[in-house]
Image (cartoon, rainbow, N blue to C red):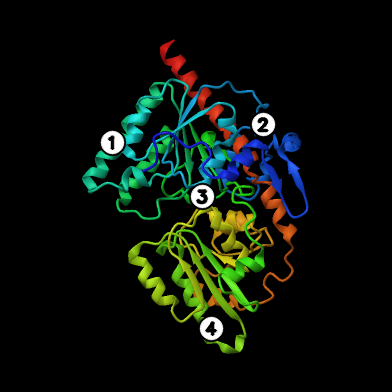
Amino acid sequence: MPSSEMRRFAPMSLNRVWASRSTSRSSSTSVSSTSRTASDARWGRRHFFDASSGGSDDRAIVEAGHDGTLPGWGAMSTGRTVLVFPFYDDNPFLNVLSLAPMAEGWEFLSAGDFDDWETRSDRLSPGDVMHLHWTAPILQTAETPADAERRLVRCGAMLSRAHRRGIGIIWTVHNRVPHEVFYADQERRLIRLISERADLIHVMSPSTVEVLADICRLPPEKVRPIPHPSYEAVYGDGPARRDARASFGLADSDRAVLFFGNVRAYKGVQSLIDAARLVQDADRSGVHLALLLAGRTPPSDRELIESALAPLKSVGHFDFVPEHEVGRWFRAADVAVFPFEKVLNSGSVHLAATFRVPVILPDVHHLRRDFGEYPWVRTFDANDPVESLASSLRDGSLFSSLKVTDFDPFLRSRAPWATSLRYRWLLQEAHSIGASRRVASTG
């Protein structure tokens, strides 16, 4: 269970990001964020939401949202607290967000489970901030439907208490619903409840409003777009490509296909395996595939996956990948495939881009909208995933014209330090909303 207080910088490389105020590295440039401040201070709408390409809700969010101006360095006073729930100390995304606020004195506290979150939220002071991320631990860990109902009521009461006491409430929308849902009706009601009670709603994908539309309407005046950060300077460079491939026993002729992340049913891993088998069975293709699969896997799925992999050249690590090992997997890969069946935001795509590994994704609307413009992304037919993926995997020319610098525009727009600065602004806004509400209620 996570510790009661948030670790400041779990990965050592995050210390380097903080100490240097983030050096954004690419193959051709090395630019300190202190020299980028002027250009990064305004995260123009064109970089995230294009009002001309979406529906009326998207346009309303663009027009209603703040102008993106970041406060000057040192503009915020210290001594404020943000309670993060849930917090996972091995999640680099949460650590990246905390960099700039912690540098200015924000204290980050964490809650390990629903009961802990409820208890700690009642200890916050007016002007503090509560930041909710993934909703699964609220209801989906309940023992029975009746327990889920009770938790839903408790959550609503807790958010109401926080609201009355002047606590700013932020919700980051990571998924449409949790990946594994046992209490679907209660979860949908929870999402509607949170969207109503939150002061600010942080979205990382311009498709979030559309994807959640059948569950709830996200109030445009609450929505704040901050894209998912890359992981530059977080994991280090990793070993040389030749050494990485040798460590997996890969031949020069092998086309290494990587799946990295939680190996679960909703990730479509079986479709990838079936596609690789289809390529292998067609000897005339002359393509030698090697599958690399890495990530936590439930025991119930592991046996099935290992059995399916048996006829293929493959390397599997069905557990958490330590930080110092992440680079080895990506440096060895020729392409990363993420055959998601139901994902809104994917840190794995950003991780692949960080290591300059091209990506194949399903051709679904929100992923095409988010990533379709980039030359390092290709798509397959989600309605015929096995045949379509096999066609892509046997196509040796698929990314033949790709240059390392083709990743730079995407990575520059999502530099970790710049993202953390935007998050700092979000905390300041939530603090101001909560404090003003407290003053109004006692005035």
Question: CA gap, disc 1 to disc 2?
Answer: 38 Å
Tell which of 289 and 389 is nearer to you: 289
Q: Residue furthest top?
A: 443
Alpha carbon distance from label 3 to label 4: 39 Å
Rendering coords of residue 371 (x, y %): 62, 57
Give the image location of residue 28, x and y in percent. 78, 53
Q: Which one is earlier in the sequence, the residue at label 1 or at label 3?
A: 1
Mark 1 or mark 4: which comes first in sequence?
Answer: 1
Q: Which mark is residue 153?
A: 1
Residue at the spot of label 2: 69
Q: Is residue 221 left or right of residue 166?
A: right
Q: How much space separates mark 1 and mark 3, taking CA atoms?
A: 27 Å
Q: Which residue is mark 4?
A: 280
Amino acid carrying label 1: it is Val
Circle 4 or circle 2, nearest the eye? 4
Q: Amino acid at mark 4?
A: Gln
Tell me the amino acid under the disc marked 2: Thr
Q: Amino acid at mark 3?
A: Glu
Pointer 1 or 2: first along the chain: 2
Cα distance in 3D space between marks 3 and 2: 26 Å
Could you classify mark 4 by the number of other residues whose Cα lies within 10 Å: few (under 14), some (14-19), or many (20 or more)?
Answer: many
SS category of the residue bearing label 2: loop
Q: What whole-number distance in Å separates the C-alpha atoms at marks 1 and 4? A: 53 Å
Provide the secondary structure element on which disc 1 rests.
helix
Along the viewing direction, whichever of 226 and 238 lies nearer the viewer:
238
Q: Nearer the viewer, residue 360 or 348?
A: 348
Q: Is residue 158 visible?
A: yes
Mark 3 and mark 4 in contact? Answer it, CB < 8 Å.
Answer: no
Front disc: 3 or 2: 2
Q: Specify the quadrant that holds the N terminus.
A: top left
Q: Secondary structure at mark 4?
A: helix
Residue assigned mark 3: 210
